[in-house]
Amino acid sequence: TDLQLSRGFEMATAASSSSGTDESQANSKWLDAHYDPVANLYTFSSCVNLADLHGDGEYKLVVGDLGTSWHDMKLKVYRGTDLLSENALPDMPASVATFLMEVHELCTPAVAVASGPFVYVYKNLRPYFKFTLPPLEINPLEKDVWEQAKEDKIDPLSLKEMLEMIREKADIPLSVRSLRFLALDPPEMDSFVNQYKMQPIKRQTVITCMSTLKKNMADEDAISCLVIGTENNEILVLDPEAFTILARMTLPSVPAFLDVMGQFDVEYRLTAACRNGCVYIFRRDSKKPKYCIELSSQPVGLVRVQKNIVAACSDQTLQGYTQKVGGGCCVQEKRD
């Protein structure tokens, strides 16, 4: 099905011997729908999506290709197994989603690519808009010591000592600049301080996962909001037209996978699997999770089917839960 393909499609890119491939297929419980050892495609399941990009009823495979270097990331579109188009991406993709931004006679979804602190939105496979996550709060003590360094009131060694004390006691984490400075050897500190002391301090988070949520109607051709999980334990819901933040939710850990159902203006359930091995469930207007499910290990996948939640875990188990009782079945997948 399209859902199975969109969640499970991965192309192998490393060529192997025919005998090794035949042996692995003979021992595997799974059948390969398609295998191409020279596809030259490097991606994750979160960067793969199926969408009717041209409103003609023909679904295309949209892939955020990681490439083979830091300068070879691309947004690729496949018709079947044939490459239809590709666009260069400015940075490493973390997630790819398709959604309708506005209602027209011809329903053509936009493509959203999450990368670092940005969401790059493409319409008709052309760059349209770049959303930037809002900056995080700066530690006032950190800002003060850098101001002293800016005015040459303290030397680099004193700056390092003060930043180390702030890092140990402060509730607000240090910025990337300060963390990089603390990792330097003494001979490198002077040049680093002189290079950055005149620049304002910034603290920015990055996107870890992304999904979509219908705005006010459940129809297939209804507009949808982007739902973003960030490294600073937050989930943001974005307006599909103005790209303003409609809702902000806080988690105890960093979200790794999202599954959303419902409509933002009516009622919805937001399920987040986090790096701490827990699954959290939000309802509409809740700033913090209403329910928590503790998994046996870290999640590697998540899907919600009506009131059932299924999580794939790193200990090779597939665990199912129902929202009523908070527990369910656990299926062990044995590997030879």
Image: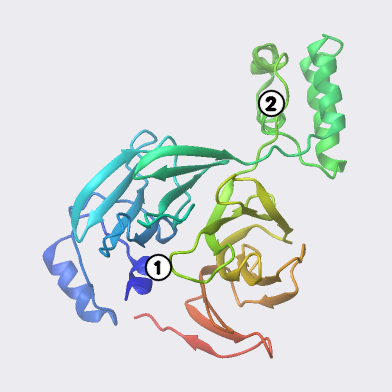
| Most foreground residue, 29 or 42 | 42
Residue 3 on image: x %, y %: 38, 72
| Left or right of residue 250: residue 30 | left
Q: Are marks 2 and 1 in contact (CB under 8 Å)?
A: no
Residue 9 visible in image: yes
Residue linked to disc 2 = 181
| Most foreground residue, 129 or 17 | 129
Q: How many numbered circles are shown?
A: 2
Name which residue type carries label 1: Arg
- Classify mark 2: helix, strand or loop: helix
- Classify mark 1: helix, strand or loop: helix
Residue 218 on image: x %, y %: 52, 71
> Where, by quadrant of the figure, is residue 22 drawn?
bottom left
Residue neighbourhood size for the residue with mark 1, other residues' Cα within 10 Å, grouped as few (<14), some (14–19), many (≥20): some
Residue linked to disc 1 = 7
Q: State the CA–CA distance, disc 2 to disc 1.
A: 40 Å
Please name the residue shown 29% across and 82% down the image. 29
